[in-house]
Every structure is written in structure tokens, then in C-alpha cells.
Amino acid sequence: MEIEHYWAGALRRAVIDGDVEYGSVMAGQSVGMVHVERPVVDIIAKLVREAEEALAR
């Protein structure tokens, strides 16, 4: 019962409060946005490149 209480609280934080940093989201909530499988190194490189571009602006 304690674990269920913790899980429900974490889900509420993410879904209702919008706190995805400390909350918990269901895998199904984001899996629909995946269109291509890529190596992690490529994903990280793209994130870094986009962050650098955003910071330059």
C-alpha cells in the first residue's frame, strides 16, 4: 500500500502539477512521439547541438 501511495503521488506530480523532473510519467504518454530509433550517442549529440544553438541566440 505504501508503494502504491508513492506511485500515485509521483504520477500526480507529473500529470497534474506538470513536474516531470520529480514526478513519474507513463511510458505510453510519450511512446507515440517516437518515429525513429537512433543510437543514444546521436540523440545526445543533437541535444547538445540544439542547446548550443539556443544559447547562441
Image: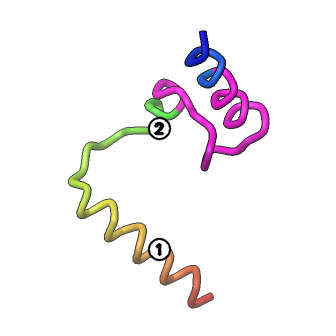
Q: Residue 32: x percent and y percent?
A: 46, 30
Q: Earlier in the sequence, mark 2 or mark 1?
A: 2
Identify the residue at horizontal 59%, vertical 23% (top origin). 7
Seen in the picture, residue 15 relative to 36 is either above or below; the reply is: above
Q: Residue furthest right?
A: 17
Q: Which residues are magenta?
A: 8-29
Q: Residue at x 66, y 18 (%)?
A: 5
Q: Is residue 35 left or right of residue 12?
A: left
Question: Where's the C terminus, which quadrant?
Answer: bottom right
Dot 1 alpha-carbon crowd within 10 angstroms: few under 14, some 14 to 19, many 20 or more:
few
Is 18 placed left or right of 37 in the picture?
right
Q: Quadrant of residue 24?
A: top right
Dividing the picture into quadrants, the one containing residue 43 is bottom left
Instruction: Please determine whether, in this image, residue 17 is positioned above or below residue 3.
Output: below
Numbered circle sitting on residue 16: none
- How packed is label 2: few (under 14 Cα within 10 Å), some, or many (20 or more)? few
**Image point 44% across, 31% down: which residue?**
31
Residue drawn 64% across the image and 28% down it = 11
Q: Is residue 49 left or right of residue 42?
A: right
Amino acid type assigned to the residue bearing label 1 in the image: Glu
51 in magenta: no
Give residue 50's mark. Answer: 1
Q: Give the position of the N terminus as an image quadrant.
A: top right
Report how far apart the C-alphas of labels 2 and 1 lie in the structure: 18 Å
SS at mark 1? helix
- Find disc 2 in the rendering and name its residue: 33
- Please state which amino acid type lies under the numbered disc 2: Met
What residue occupies the far front of the structure in this picture? 2
Camera-side residue of 4 and 52: 4
| Residue closest to the eye, 29 or 33 | 29
Q: Kindly state the secondary structure of the residue where label 2 is placed.
A: loop
User: In the picture shown, does residue 8 fall above or below 43?
Assistant: above
